[in-house]
């Protein structure tokens, strides 16, 4: 078994790493949380209705609900509070569409859509003086009576890196600490970030009662996770010393996949829909770093010397398919009530290549769960003004079992005339985030609430 295979196996086997350092394998599977203002205000429940650019990314058949060409641009400002504090503005969605109407009333539509979703909170931090378990104690507990090489081969990077940085010594049978005592101060921070991009070209055909559509999507995701721990108060040679460690795990993934959907009319006011997103492969560049560093006040030659353990790999990962269905009731020209359900199974072998990693993929799969997504939305029109509300609940933010779900409530309004539209939405999302504490082992709860203000301006091209 190659050394890198054993290194990667360690990522799966280490109990406190299993929910964190592999986060990027599944975070890219998160459903995008941003879209046009109408889409956000109605909870994203528009796959049976259309007339919205973000709905095309869910169900390409809705591209045929347009009878004229249109271009739109969406802007978003977000503010997070609680365990994940962040703020920022960006442009999450762009749409261009064109429609050709046949002599028999049928429509052929073309659409180009982009969407971006960001999750980049400020670091979650913890500072304490009542230290229960120090980094050195944690490394020793992980190492047991293993040699440094055995620690490396089994993926116990903390003990191995600590040995290389002269925090520990080895007598041939056991690892022992050089720096003694329990630290009096500890600071710890934990950061996660994810940026997902979608670019999709769609073609749809509509007849009197039914529409069919297909799309080709290019997706890209950049994810990063980092844990930083600094402890002060270790004793060696009459000095009080500081140990700092940083573990960073990041990846860039990308690929293409097909999407299909239909949209049908049942009676005069009922609409039904179904859509399927095909499974595909994502090309992933993975980077892993484990660093141990001395504190700035440590004297030279005492305590810790800098050391870095790193690994870079190219992988092929499964981007699982998903399917969904929707239903909507339209109340003439006054508005609608809609609902949508989507299911995304967890991949059984998330790593497809290299072949030596497939067994590791099966171990990762044991930590993955399917995703369930439910959306309900409503709109009521009063002349040129529309009022909207919606709810969006996801069982989890990714396939990883430790990633909690979220519930999002939204409301908004829009103003329309013959040539242009302006929509605005206010959305709030509640998350019960959690991680496993890197040293103590307990569940570290990090609940959060996020507000998003979204605005979309659309112009008809003819």
Image: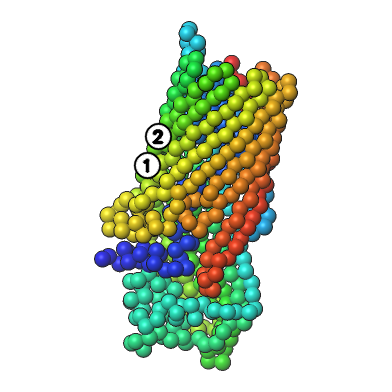
Q: Residue at x 44, y 37 (%)?
A: 323
* Disc 1: which residue: 280
Q: Quadrant of residue 35?
A: top right
Give the residue at x 27% y 54%: 355
* Residue 112 visible in the current orientation: no
Residue 228 lies in quadrant = bottom right
* Earlier-in-chain disc, 2 versus 1: 2
Residue depicted at 47% across the width and 62% down the height: 19
Q: Secondary structure at mark 1?
A: strand
User: Residue 442's x, y, as percent?
Assistant: 55, 69
Report the residue that reaches farthest toward the bottom.
Answer: 238
Q: Are marks 2 and 1 in contact (CB under 8 Å)?
A: yes
- Residue 432 x, y percent position in the rendering: 60, 56
Q: Depth check: 242 or 119 in front?
A: 119
Would you say 61 lies left or right of 455 here?
A: left
Give the total of numbered labels: 2
């Amino acid at each position: 078994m190659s050394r890198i295979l054993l290194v990667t196996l360690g990522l799966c086997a280490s109990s406190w790493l299993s929910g964190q350092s592999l986060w990027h394998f599944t975070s890219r599977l998160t459903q995008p949380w941003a879209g046009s203002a109408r889409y956000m205000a109605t909870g994203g429940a528009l796959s049976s209705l259309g007339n919205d650019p973000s709905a095309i990314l869910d169900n390409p058949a809705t591209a045929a609900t347009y009878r004229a060409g249109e271009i739109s641009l969406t802007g978003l400002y977000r503010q997070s509070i609680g365990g994940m504090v962040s703020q920022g503005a960006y442009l999450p969605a762009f749409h261009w569409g064109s429609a050709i109407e046949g002599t028999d009333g049928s429509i052929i539509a073309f659409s180009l859509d982009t969407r971006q979703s960001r999750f980049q909170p400020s670091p979650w931090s913890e500072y304490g003086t009542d230290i229960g378990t120090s980094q050195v104690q944690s490394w020793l507990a992980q190492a047991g009576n293993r040699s440094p090489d055995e620690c490396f081969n089994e993926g116990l990077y903390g003990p191995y890196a600590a040995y290389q940085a002269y925090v520990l010594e080895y007598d041939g049978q056991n690892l022992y600490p050089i720096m003694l005592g329990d630290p009096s101060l500890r600071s710890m921070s934990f950061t996660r970030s994810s940026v997902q991009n979608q670019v999709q070209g769609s073609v749809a055909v509509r007849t009197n009662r039914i529409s069919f559509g297909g799309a080709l999507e290019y997706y890209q995701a950049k994810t990063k996770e980092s844990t930083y721990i600094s402890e002060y108060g270790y004793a060696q040679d009459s000095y009080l010393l500081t140990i700092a460690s940083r573990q960073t795990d990041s990846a860039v993934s990308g690929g293409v996949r097909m999407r299909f959907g239909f949209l049908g009319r049942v009676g005069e006011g009922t609409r039904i829909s179904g859509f399927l997103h095909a499974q595909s492969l994502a090309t992933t560049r993975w980077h892993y770093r484990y660093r141990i560093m001395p504190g700035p006040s440590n004297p030279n030659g005492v305590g810790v010397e800098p050391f870095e353990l790193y690994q870079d790999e190219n992988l092929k990962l499964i981007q699982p398919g998903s399917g969904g269905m929707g239903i909507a009731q339209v109340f003439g020209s006054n508005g609608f009530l809609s609902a949508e359900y989507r299911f995304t199974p967890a991949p059984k072998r998330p790593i497809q290549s290299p072949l030596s990693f497939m067994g590791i993929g099966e171990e990762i799969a044991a930590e993955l769960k399917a995703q369930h997504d439910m959306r309900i939305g409503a709109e009521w029109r009063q002349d040129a003004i529309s009022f909207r509300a919606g709810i969006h609940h996801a069982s989890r933010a990714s396939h990883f079992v430790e990633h909690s779900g979220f519930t999002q409530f939204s409301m908004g309004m829009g103003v329309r005339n013959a040539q242009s539209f302006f929509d605005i939405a206010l959305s709030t999302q509640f998350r019960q985030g959690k991680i496993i504490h890197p040293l103590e082992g307990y569940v570290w709860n990090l609940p959060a609430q996020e507000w998003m203000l979204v605005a979309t301006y659309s112009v008809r091209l003819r």
